[in-house]
Image: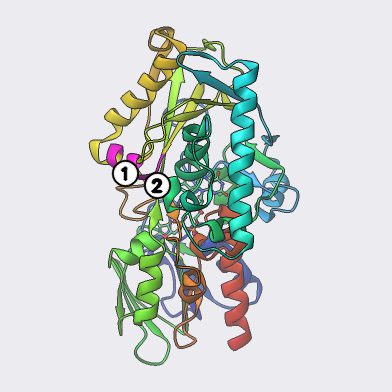
Amino acid sequence: MSNLSDFPTNPDVVIVGAGAAGLGAARKLVKSGRSVLVVEADRRVGGRAWTQTDSFGSPVDMGCSWLSGSNRNKLAKVARRHEFTLVDHTDVPTALFVDGRRATHEELTAYDTTGAMIEKAMNRAGKRGLDVSCEDVIPKGLRFAGAVKAWMGPMDYGVDFKDVSALDDYLSADDQPSCIVAEGLGNVVAMLAIGVPIALGTKVRTIDWSGKGVQIETSAGTIRAKICIVTVSTGVLASDAIRFVPELPVAKQEAIHDLPMGLLVKVPLLFDGARLGLKDNEWMSYDIPETSPTRACFFITWPFGYDYVFGNIGGEFGWELSRAGPEATVDFALQEMVKQIGSDVRKHFVKGLATEWATNPLTLGAYAALRPGCHGARKILQAPLGDRVFFAGEAMGGRRCALVNGAYESGRRAAKELCKLT
Ligand SMILES: Cc1cc2nc3c(=O)[nH]c(=O)nc-3n(C[C@H](O)[C@H](O)[C@H](O)COP(=O)(O)OP(=O)(O)OC[C@H]3O[C@@H](n4cnc5c(N)ncnc54)[C@H](O)[C@@H]3O)c2cc1C
């Protein structure tokens, strides 16, 4: 592990954060011949791309798992180059349950029809430029709307369906095919760190851009550079963990406020090898009432044939459970499985985990979700300050915002822009 004392503290460019955005920027700048230093508060690289292997004996992606648009996704290229195993996960079947039994053929058709109707209504509104809540533009009283909206809101955007902007959704790419990575997507992103100077365990506290260049105060000392790229989450920016001198312009502060963090809590549950009637690599969901917040945990079953499923809980209810702690979160997920599948679930259950992105001070949520009515905030956030402080990260991922490849591309774009200036 490298510390700040291992590097010169006067690089051309300092990059705050060694997630996909920071590493994407750093690689481009190293290639261009600039001197670069990445400072990362954590003791590992990858940020919200993190594969855990200690707990279950097989890789578990605690952050991102899917590489969307994997034919053109640059991170999929990295994965292939390093001989990772990519498994197609496009249009995998849904095991839908209704009151503890498998849905009938008619129910499955009704579920698909509702999904298609809601999607169509959202697209129509987005196409018309309506930057309003998705809830305001969809037909009401549809069978299985609770489950469909749970997927489209909390499980996808990390916010309840009413908090998704129809316009932002319309402007987001829906890249297919999508793949999962047997050895872990977090491990793919970690490959980007090869050959990049990174000071780990170095927390940035102040970014002073009042003079020529920037002066960065960290937990391990001071760095002076010509330019800085900030890649921390909007949750971290909003928390004031990093002080800007002079403070950020009001428009920038408002943009941060308009891009609050959504939350997706992942709940991997390890079993003893029993399959509980569920197939490998499927979605499992169930009929739920249309409540807000959405109280649901939907699952991916036995990814790659590993002996675990992972639950997904998002939106307001995810924050509520995160406050209650990992044990309460695992309990909820397990109980939801028992309700649909029966008491065998408890008999074969070994142990569970719950991700803690909500309380981790280096993330404070999963990914940014634009508030309805705030279109334009992403661009404002992305604009550089005085040509010496640049911003990148998933919230500025363009049509791939919230995604790991969007974060990566945003870092590369910031690097490219600053190369034009220096
Ligand atoms: C549960 C979950 C599921 C997801 N699923 C998917 C998916 O399936 N597909 C997909 O494409 N995307 C997914 N994502 C989103 C994806 O993981 C993120 O968009 C991406 O990893 C963000 O990268 P980033 O570089 O913008 O930010 P980060 O990865 O957060 O990097 C920022 C870095 O800054 C560091 N930092 C913070 N504060 C400081 C400080 N003061 N000083 C120094 N360093 C600091 C952090 O430790 C972090 O390493 C998921 C995310 C989560 C949480």
Distance between the alpha carbons at the discs numbered 2 and 1: 7 Å
Q: Is residue 298 above or below residue 103?
A: below
What is the x, y in percent for residue 32?
65, 76
Q: Which residue is mark 1?
A: 319
**For residue 250: magenta?**
no
- What's the amino acid at mark 1? Trp
Q: Residue at x 39, y 44 (%)?
A: 315
Label 1 secondary element:
helix
In the image shown, does 48 or 216 lie closer to the viewer? 48
Q: Which residue is mark 2?
A: 263
Q: Is residue 284 above or below residue 45?
A: above
Horizontal arrangement in the rendering, residue 336 relative to residue 178 (left or right): left
Label 2 secondary element:
loop
Which image quadrant is residue 373 in? bottom left
Q: Is residue 413 above or below residue 161?
A: below
Horizontal arrangement in the rendering, residue 216 relative to residue 179 (left or right): left
Q: Is residue 334 visible?
A: yes
Q: Residues within 10 Å of mark 1 (few under 14, many from 20)?
A: many
Quadrant containing the C terminus is bottom right
Q: Residue at x 63, y 76 (%)?
A: 416
Q: Is residue 392 above or below residue 333?
A: below
Q: Residue at x 46, y 55 (%)?
A: 133
Badge 1 residue CB within 8 Å of ligand 1: no
Badge 2 residue CB within 8 Å of ligand 1: no
Q: Residue at x 52, y 32 (%)?
A: 59
Q: Determine contact: label 2, label 1, CB under 8 Å.
A: yes
